[in-house]
Image (spheres, coloured by chain):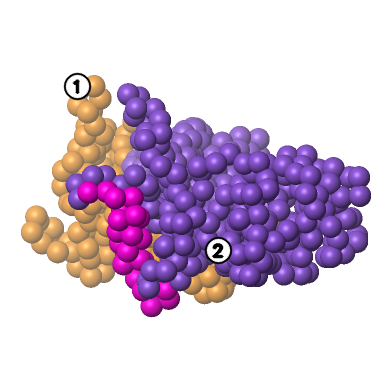
Amino acid sequence: MSLAQQFRTGDTPLPDIIILTHKLARAYDMGGEVVRALRGVSLQIRRNEYVAIMGPSGSGKSTLMNLIGCLDTPTGGEYWLNGQKVSDLGDDALARIRNKEIGFVFQTFNLLPRATALHNVELPLIYAGLGAKERRAQAAQALERVGLGDRMEHRPNELSGGQRQRVAIARALVNDPSILLADEPTGNLDSATSGEIMEVFGALHRQGQTVVMVTHEHDIAAHAARVVTLRDGLVATDQRQAA
Amino acid sequence: MTSLFEGVGIALGSLRVHKMRAALTILGVAIGVMVVMVIGSLIAGFNKGLSDMLETLGPKTFYVGRFWGGAGNEDPDDPNPWRRRPPLTIAEAERLEQLPTVKFAVVDENANADIVFEGKRLGAVSIQGRDADWPKVAGGDIYPGRSFSPLEDKANAFVVVINIKVSEQLFGERDPIGHRIKIAGLPYDVIGVYDPPTGLFGEGDQNEVFIPYGTLVKNVPYRPDWMDFFVAPEDSVPIERAIDDVTIALRTMRGLRPGQPNNFDVVTQEKYLETVNSMTSVFKVIMIVLSMVGLMVGGIGVVAIMMISVTERTREIGVRKALGATRREVLWQFLVEAATLTLVGGVIGMTAGGLISLLLAAATPIPAYVPLGSVIVALVAAAFTGLLFGIYPASKASRLDPVEALRYE
């Protein structure tokens, strides 16, 4: 960890560090009782890293994932994403950040069931304010990138699980985000399909994409170059490994 | 703008998926809008008929009568105030016609009598006693033939102008001009056929004939004392001046002292319109209330369907937010969806209402007509209902927490 910046409150992260959390905390008020899901996570992820976040259920990995994904705001500490401090931004500013900086891949794919693959991939571009023609072109390109150039007009229920997840990956990539954020991306897939999806992730990483993936499966985490393990709301281990 | 079309597309897609549910919601709005359209077209038709009628009369013509009741000013202690008033006389009409500010004063006296032609009898035909100027105030056309001349008028000639309805019944396809008919037992020469303007209450539909005033008074039994005048001011004279002159002339003839009230009434078209409008404004209030109730019922349906839709699509909302939709964009999407629902209802209701109005106009004497204004009002009201009643569900959707929404099963 000698490469990590010695970060103190008031500092700004080095330009190469795309994700920096400093003593990040998140507490929930559960009917009077305060549950501290994260108790001070300090983590630095550089551009083009491939990181898996692991941990047993209740370790806080989903909470950390929601904070990194700007879906939630911390109750303590700082979060810097791509040189911008986002931990104290409001709802709409976070929505803009999500649109620009983050590509989500979910366990349950979360595609709009009545929309075609192409339209699903277009969604982030709609919120980015792009015109219809440009949207269509970029979405088609993203689908081709994940090998679904011939399935653009299919609806999710006409696609296999692996194909659905590829659509979701295309949707995550279409805005050219700073990080690809995947939450149990193979949780709903069989092992052969899981392998295919992991190959897609690997290829994206080789092309320069920063990938952060939450998983509880060791063989999936093994695809990443670095594994961060959480336990009881704190970082337990942080190891680099041979891909 | 992009998200507007997006919203309309999503809304139409959602309508396709939940046809029954959407149909019921739309029906509520459609009925509300239909009520607005039908009642609106009735009022519009009525007003149009009125202004058409007044137009044929000439905008400056006014009415002088023994008593003008107007609407709603009956006094229970004095139910028959006209009893104290003397009837108008032909001498008064002649005096008014001599005023420099008056172009003509047409007298109007009427009776009911039977008409006979070649053994065919029409009972209780309205016999109008007029002077030679009457076609100028009555509107409509006299064709074929002509009306009576001032000379025939002065001579109390036995000539008659019959209206189309009488002509059809007595003569069928034949040309009535030059034939002789009997009115109240006396023979008259038919000199013209009168085609009346479209009347407000279907006046043109009754059997009606026109004879010189003097002829009527002398030869047809009538209920006296209810003659009235239509007075037209000279072209260059303002109506107020003519009214003043007429009022002064009548007061002088009747020997009224200053301070005594008029014992006759002068009514302008404006005043007439006012009276009619005060009646139609009651209709308008009823229409507004009815349509508001209708739209509100539709609106409640909109709230219900949108609440269900928001709940069902919680996850979709979560996904959209994760992909970068702001609160405003989510709010907008659901507002547009609600407005699309009601707008579809509005279009259906408008079409149904328009058809009913046309049917009414064709099948009954009510001159219903659909003005462009009420089409626009109906559509705007429908869309506005959607926006208004969509606010609550849409704002609920927009305030969903993305983490919670994504976790929703």
Q: Which mark is residue A114?
A: none
Q: Nearer the viewer, residue A229 or A40?
A: A40
* Residue B155 within the segment the image draws in magenta: no
Relative to A23, B96 lies left or right:
right
| Rendered image quadrant of residue B194 | bottom right
Give residue B253's position: percent from left, percent from top: 34, 55
The residue carrying mark 2 is B137
Q: Residue at x 61, y 69 (%)?
A: B150
Return the mark for residue A32: 1
**Residue B61 at what x, y percent from top left?**
46, 63
Please provide percent x and percent y for residue A170: 53, 61
Which secondary structure lies at badge 2?
Answer: helix
Provide the residue span drawn in magenta: B233-257
Q: Chain B appears in which tint?
A: purple
- Relative to residue B326, is residue B216 drawn left or right? right
Seen from the viewer's position, the closer of residues A28 and B158 is B158
Left or right side of A84 for A145 = right
Q: Is residue A12 above or below residue A76?
A: below
Question: What quarter of the picture does the N terminus of chain A occupy?
Answer: bottom left
Q: Residue at x 27, y 48 (%)?
A: B256
From the viewer's side, name the closer residue of A106 and B405. Answer: B405
| Chain to which mark 1 belongs | A
Callout in the foreground (1, 2): 2
- The 10 Å Cα crowd at callout 1, few under 14, some 14 to 19, many 20 or more, is few
Mark 1 to mark 2: distance in Å? 87 Å
Residue B81 drawn above or below residue B202 = above
Image chain in orange: A
Res. B348 in view = no
